[in-house]
Image: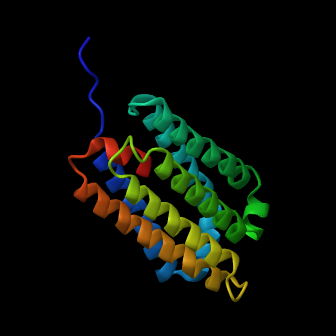
Amino acid sequence: MPPKKRIPTGWLLIVVGIVFLAIGIFVFLYPWHAYYRLAKYTGILLLLNAVLLLYIAITRTRGAKERNWILAESVIDFLFVLLFLFNALLSFLVLPFFIATWMGVMGGLKIAASFALKKKIRGWGFILIEGMISLLFSFWVFHAPSPNAVSIITPIGLFALLMGAFNLIEAVRFKKMENSLDMML
């Protein structure tokens, strides 16, 4: 049976990076509309991310430990999808808290995964940095000085820009290191 052709992780990181950059740019260009649009489309974006992570966990991981961490991230994304897609009014009213909670949970998971997989994958330090950035932005959104929509959307937009740039840089930088990138998604 011939080996299956699969999309290189670097290309997946590029797609994720472009999506994050587009969200960040949109937030800064149209802050008043961004809050509404994020409330509307965050569930769809998280669903796409969860499906992508599930695909990676099933088809790409080399070890059970890495697969379990990626599956955990996918399950968490699916849980947030349920909140966003099936209760639109609630997600509109508490969008910043949902997003901040998601950032914090993902950040903590990536930090834990980076230490657990330290000896198994080469890019563990970049996973750690991504997790730390997520945690910092989670705290920023939770402790924003003003509760209005535009002031809360600013750290979310900046987070999206940083994660987009981070993913694009890592896709180019680690083009040859396929096994270190799966966990970054």
Q: Is residue 154 visible?
A: yes
Residue that protrudes farthest toward the left in the picture: 176
Task: Report whether 182 appears left or right of 151.
Answer: left
Q: Is residue 172 above or below residue 32?
A: above
Please name whichever residue, 131 or 45, is drawn nearer the observer in this view of the structure: 131
Name which residue lies at 47% across and 82% down.
29
Q: Where on the picture, by quarter, is residue 4? A: top left
Numbered-mark total: 0
Q: Position of residue 126 (x, y in %)?
A: 38, 59
Q: Where on the picture, by quarter, is residue 168? A: bottom left
Q: Position of residue 1 (x, y in %)?
A: 26, 11
How is the protein colored in the picture? Answer: rainbow
Q: Position of residue 185 (x, y in %)?
A: 44, 50
Name which residue lies at 41% across and 33% down.
61
Q: Is residue 185 visible?
A: no
Residue that protrudes farthest toward the front in the picture: 119
Q: Position of residue 124 (x, y in %)?
A: 39, 52
Q: Is residue 95 above or below residue 76?
A: below
Task: Report whether 58 appears left or right of 10.
Answer: right
Q: Is residue 147 above or below residue 92?
A: below
Name which residue lies at 39% across and 43% down.
119
Please name whichever residue, 144 or 157, is drawn nearer the observer in this view of the structure: 144
Task: Report whether 61 appears left or right of 40.
Answer: left
